[in-house]
Amino acid sequence: MDSDKTAKLSFEGALTKLEAIVDSMESGEVPLAELLAKYEEGSKLLKVCEGRLKEAELKIEKLKKAKDGTAAFEPYESNRTE
């Protein structure tokens, strides 16, 4: 998959493609050369997913408001382990 096309994918689109790659890799029926290419593509898709999640976290922080109407920037607590 082209890097430009990968970067333009939505979170859901990238996640769907990533899940398909993982499923095919776990099947054990993929030749080594293809397995390496799929791993590389999966790594790119993972970065896209992480980037989209980070964007969403930042938007959530911006949307939080204090009771008096001023912006209350509170860090988003995620359950992810990095």
Image (spheres, rainbow, N blue to C red):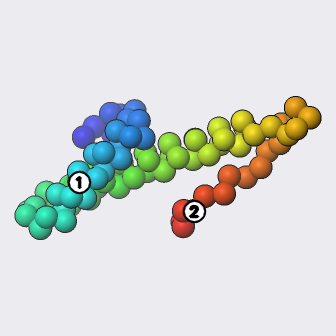
Q: Is residue 58 left or right of residue 44?
A: right
Discs 1/2, front: 2
Instruction: Say the numbered circle drawn on residue 79.
Output: 2
Disc 1 packing (10 Å; few <14; some 14–19; many ≥20) = some
- The quarter of the image holding the N terminus is top left
Q: Nearer the viewer, residue 46 or 13?
A: 13
The tag on residue 2 is none
Q: Height in image: 57 above or below 27?
A: above
| Of pointers 1 and 2, the one earlier in the residue sequence | 1
Q: CA distance from mark 1 to mark 2?
A: 24 Å
**Residue 54 in picture, x, y percent from top left:** 57, 47
Report the label total.
2
Crowd around label 2: few <14 · some 14–19 · many ≥20 (10 Å):
few
**Measuring 62% from the left and 46% from the top, which residue is drawn there?**
57
Q: Quadrant of residue 13?
A: top left
Left or right of residue 1, residue 61 in this image: right
The image's mark for residue 21 is 1
